[in-house]
Image: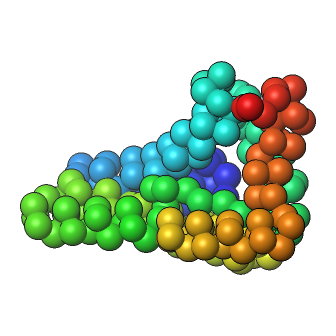
Amino acid sequence: MRPRDHLILGTGASVAMYHTFGSNTVFFWVATFMIDIDHYLNFIYHNGFRSASFKKMFDYYGVIDNLAHLPEFLDIEVFHSGEFMLALYLLARLSDSFVLKAVMWGFLFHIVLDWISLAWNGIFLKRANLVAEYFIRKRRLMSSGLDPVYVYNEALRNIGMYPKD
């Protein structure tokens, strides 16, 4: 799902909750789109830390969107993973922090929207939801002769960058 869509839907959900949580709703709202910072970190990692350009990142993911149906495509977004969400849940619960709970619910709202978008686009199974699942699926793809890194390298080539060595 596009960042703009997350911003619009997160804003709508936040407005709906405002009467209950007041200005504290801002923590939920910010979390509904800030979770995607992991996409930015992935872009920086995949390009070998040579570019931190937001424009290039958006171009890169535009190409990725067009390549997502390839059989070798496999994605993991760490802040979207079950392991990260479990850690956030435990931290929020143990600390009884309203802010951490609001962030956790904002992240979960975002993740559910992503799942709906992935399913709608026929690529639901292209994102691993657990880090462990990612490495298992990556190994399976590689053992069948497919290179999951190909899509990322191809996207870099398409935006005029070259893959890291």
The quarter of the displayed image where residue 103 is located: bottom left
The quarter of the displayed image where residue 92 is located: bottom left
Q: Is residue 161 visible?
A: yes
Q: Residue 70, how many percent across, how many down?
A: 88, 64
The quarter of the displayed image where residue 128 is located: bottom right
For the N terminus, the image quarter is bottom right
Give the side of residue 126 with respect to residue 147, left or right: left
Which residue does the image show at 39% across and 67% down from the upper left?
A: 83
- Asked whether 152 or 136 is in front, the reply is 136
Q: Residue furthest left?
A: 95
Which residue does the image show at 78% across and 34% down from the upper left?
A: 163
Tell me which colouring the rendered structure shows. Answer: rainbow
- Asked whether 159 or 46 is in front, the reply is 46
For the C terminus, the image quarter is top right
Q: Residue 104, how many percent across, how many down?
A: 32, 63
Which residue does the image show at 72% across and 37% down from the upper left?
A: 58
Count every numbered label the image shows and give the total.
Answer: 0
Q: Residue 38, how many percent across, how many down?
A: 52, 47
Q: Tell me: residue 82, above or below residue 79.
A: below
Q: Tell me: residue 98, above or below residue 4.
A: below
Q: Tell me: residue 98, above or below residue 161.
A: below
Give the side of residue 156 with respect to residue 52, left or right: right
Q: Residue 162, how many percent across, how many down?
A: 82, 29
Give the side of residue 29 with respect to residue 94, left or right: right
- Asked whether 112 or 141 is in front, the reply is 141
Which residue does the image show at 31% across and 49% down from the upper left?
A: 26
Q: Is residue 105 visible?
A: no
